Image (cartoon, rainbow, N blue to C red):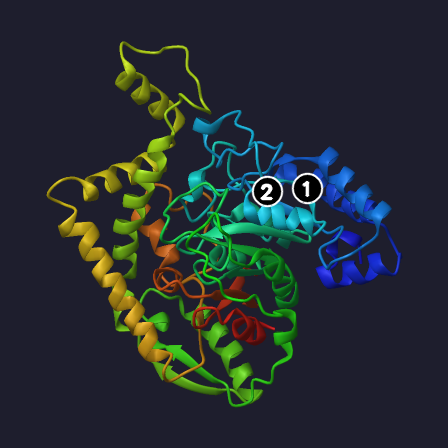
Amino acid sequence: MNLNELTIREAHDGLKAKKFSSEELTNACLRRISERNPTLNAFIEVTSDIALAQAKKVDKEGVKGMLSGIPIGIKDIFCVKGMKTTGASKILDGFSSPYDATVVGKLRSAGAVFLGRTNMDEFACGASTEHSCYGVTKNPKDSERVPGGSSGGSAAAVADNMCLAAIGTDTGGSIRQPASFCGCYGLKPTYGRVSRYGVLAMASSWDTIGPFARSAEDIAIMLEVMAGCDSRDSTTPDVAVPDYAGALHQDIKGLKIGIPKEYFGEGVEEETKNIVMQAIKGLEKKGAILKEVSLPMTKYAIAVYYISMPAELSANLARYDGVRFGLNIDDKGDDLNEYYEKVRGSGFGDEIKRRIMIGTYVLSAGYYDAYYKKAQKVRTLIIKDFGKVFDEVDVLCAPVSPFPAFKLGENLDDPLKMYMADALTIPASAAGLPALSVPCGVSAAGLPIGLQVIGRQFEEGRVLGVGF
């Protein structure tokens, strides 16, 4: 096995035993990137010098924690001191961050090695990583298909052994869906479990930060470093961070697993249903108790999301004006408003413009109560749905996506069809619940299919245990 194919646990044990150095491990990843990235476009910038300097430091000072000397990818939405951060948008062209996002700072302190920035849909808006100013990312299992989105670059990089792990963001499914499409593990933690400080904001009441890796154990190792309260993010509650890796070996005998019937209904491909159910039956054989449950408000989740999210997005993106940072154009126009129009017109992509227009509309005078406020009320009903179900069961198991990875360009002309890719991930996001994507099989065409494990708030340990 090549060094770049190791899990975090295997790499840590090898580094501790001095079977190889972090520099050797990092170079193995860099070689893989140089071989495969021209085809896949998972990384938009490879920071070889930074990575090798970090690796040499670990080799000199010795391996300390589990992430010490481990090469990872960072989605281009996190501020990293001394590196560019653009959100895969032309409007942030040339912007370098003067500080680390909280989660990046934690990973840096843990000794992680930063290989570079991974590709994404512009400002995390998309389900396919086709909306990036750096070009599309391709699925490592089939280069004619999408890797999912918006964190497609991170998922593709992990699945193709370019890095041992990566970080991404999940607003409506942007970690779980690409993890499912590419065949790796991806966790959306509880909303607020990981600090959003220093992460480019998309929809502030939905955005969640989480890891990609090649095993449930590696996800647990990553989360233990990333999670925790942060005084710079008021949405991070003071809830203790448990030993996630230690929770993996819990006995699932007697564990009550809910199977939400709405997640196996119309629009979900038969092959996907069968493969996911086969995996769930495997848990039953290990002693879990299966129970069909209902989440009737699920059918409204997409409508709630595509009202609430664009509204929050349009407010957050108002800060990009071409004055303080990012894109600067020569044609200034006749006044400031015209300058704003020119900068945003050339700086934002089509999908971003579409969502800004929807969001501005639903927040405008006379429409706020009819749309945004009503969507928030329905979101509360979705939360109550989950609350009732979790009185009966311990976790929920369902598909991540209604279908495997679709072909590049297939849904670009049909935004509504594209939005359906997140139909089964949005409900857990609406309720702020932890949810894990676990590879559970492949389609007849050889495409990965993911099982989604959803738990109660702050019960990531239980969710990871089921995934393990």
140 vs 335: above or below: below
Quadrant placement of the C terminus: bottom right
Q: CA distance from mark 1 to mark 2?
A: 12 Å
175 vs 463: above or below: above
Question: Is 168 on the left-hand or right-hand side of 32?
Answer: left
Instruction: Say whether residue 414 is visible.
Output: no
> In the rendered structure, which amino acid carries the disc numbered 1?
Leu
Rendering coords of residue 433 (x, y %): 42, 66
Q: Which residue is mark 1?
A: 115
Q: Residue at x 89, y 57 (%)?
A: 19
Q: Residue at x 45, y 72 (%)?
A: 455
Q: Find residue 137 and report its image quarter.
A: top right
Crowding at label 1, few (<14), some or many (≥20) Cα neighbours within 10 Å? Answer: many
Question: Is 359 on the left-hand or right-hand side of 288?
Answer: left
Instruction: Say whether residue 251 is visible.
Output: yes
Q: Residue at x 24, y 41 (%)?
A: 358
Tag of residue 404: none
> In the rendered structure, which amino acid carries the disc numbered 2?
Ala
Determine whether label 1 and label 2 are within 8 Å by CB.
Answer: no
Depth-wise, is mark 1 or mark 2 nearer the camera?
Answer: 1
Quadrant placement of the N terminus: bottom right
Crowding at label 2, few (<14), some or many (≥20) Cα neighbours within 10 Å? Answer: many
Query: Could you say whether the residue bearing mark 2 is in a helix, strand or loop?
Result: loop
Question: Is 104 on the left-hand or right-hand side of 123?
Answer: right
Q: Which residue is mark 2?
A: 42
Query: Could you say whether the residue bearing mark 1 is in a helix, strand or loop?
Result: strand
Rendering coords of residue 71 (x, y %): 71, 48
Q: Residue at x 59, y 44 (%)?
A: 74
